[in-house]
Amino acid sequence: MNVCPVDFDDDAVRADLRRELLAWFDGRQRDLPWRRHRSLYGTWISEMMLQQTTVATVVPYWERFLARFPDVQSLAAAPEEDVLAHWSGLGYYRRARQLHAAARQVVAEFGGALPGDVDAWRGLPGIGPYAAGAIASLGLGLPEAAVDANVRRVLGRWLGASGQPGSLPARTVEDLARALVRGDRPGAWNEALMELGALVCQARAPHCEACPVRASCGAHQLGIADAPAAPGIRAVAVPVQVLLIAFVAADHLWLEPPGGRLINCGVDAAPARQELGSLHQGLLTLPTTAWYQRPPRRSLGLLGALPPGWAAVAGFPGAGPADRVGSFRHAITRFRLVVDVAVVDVSRPWAAPASNGDPWPGAKQGRAGRWVPLADAPGLNISQLARKALRLIADARG
Ligand code: SF4
């Protein structure tokens, strides 16, 4: 590690740095709905949604979510299916379930009053050190640090690291974050750090010439701000091909929970992932084949590889031939999917399992699911894969 040329123990250095960054933030911050009328509840929802997701994606979801669940009481009282429906498309659905569980815990344990200190926030499902610090500083005005990967990179550069992960002891960054958040407007300070990381001090190409704090940045002074990132730190992407089938009977579509039987294709390819239940837990999706590992620059031709009688074997009696609609690309965690979509017209729809309160009886054993009006499907809590497939089908059918 390089010796940092900036002395952050100097009160005057820290004061200059704080003043310059906050002035920049006041003039340049993005207009975001959760910033317009800052509330503790709205801050909590935004922080949960923003994990692993871009600001541009989150904005319309946040607005719809707040319109439907304007406070913790309405969120706690809602059925999980409703919460997931308003999260559908954001991905990482575990966050939505944890948010829902936390709302119920707040109502049950605190009478619906959101916690007023960082430790109580950390005791709620889905709230780690970063989220607790962000919520406490932005929503409560408390001097708590909030260090995510973005902020870690910025602070690391200030301390004279090149931005390479692992090039600084984590403790140093945390200490600096705690030292700098003390003072006026701790929430604005944390937001300013996040904004600088998002707009100026970006991972691959920091815009040092436009940076309001370059005079206090160790990496800039050392001339190493845009050193290349360390190799080999990314998860290896797994190319995958999969076939989704939309069974349609008289303008009704068959949807089912994940985790049921997969449609078997007679292709000579290793499954990249066979157990799909945990991926879209709590959502509805289209019947699918396994996720097959995709060879470079070659299609597995999954539709053509369906064996005779495949539909009946898979539990779809009376299904007609499958017509290809098209394909799209999609990424889920480390998997890079090419998704083929086909439509099968069903003349005699099979009966859905009787419901006994559990909407998906027998999901693990066979074909649990239900017929829904095709026009209603996009409004349900369906997986993003199914949503993209339905858009493709709607386009193809005009
Ligand atoms: S000077 Fe460059 S490296 Fe330093 S904080 Fe600003 S953008 Fe980041």
Image (cartoon, helix red, strand yellow):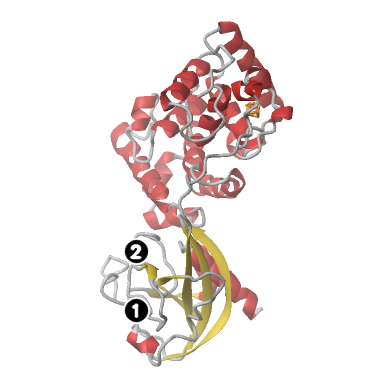
Q: x, y percentage for residue 397?
A: 63, 80
Q: Which residue is mark 2?
A: 277
Looking at the image, is mark 1 or mark 2 earlier in the sequence? 2
Q: Quadrant of the C terminus?
A: bottom right
| Above or below: residue 122 compared with residue 182 | below
Q: x, y percentage for residue 326?
A: 59, 77
CA–CA distance between discs 1 and 2? 19 Å
Q: Which residue is mark 1?
A: 352
Q: Residue 154 appears in which quarter of the rendering?
A: top right
Crowding near the residue tagged with mark 1, few <14, some 14–19, many ≥20 C-alpha atoms within 10 Å: some
What residue lies at 51% left-to-right and 48% top-to-bottom? Answer: 65
Using the image as rendered, state which of residue 351 and residue 13 is in the foreground.
13
Looking at the rendering, the quadrant in which ligand 1 lies is top right
Mark 2 residue CB less than 8 A from any atom of ligand 1 = no
| Above or below: residue 349 compared with residue 3 | below
Q: Which residue extends farthest right?
A: 209
What residue lies at 46% left-to-right and 30% top-to-bottom? Answer: 135
What residue lies at 40% left-to-right and 89% top-to-bottom? Answer: 307
Query: Can residue 143 be seen in this snapshot?
Result: no
**Residue type of the residue flagged with mark 2:** Gly
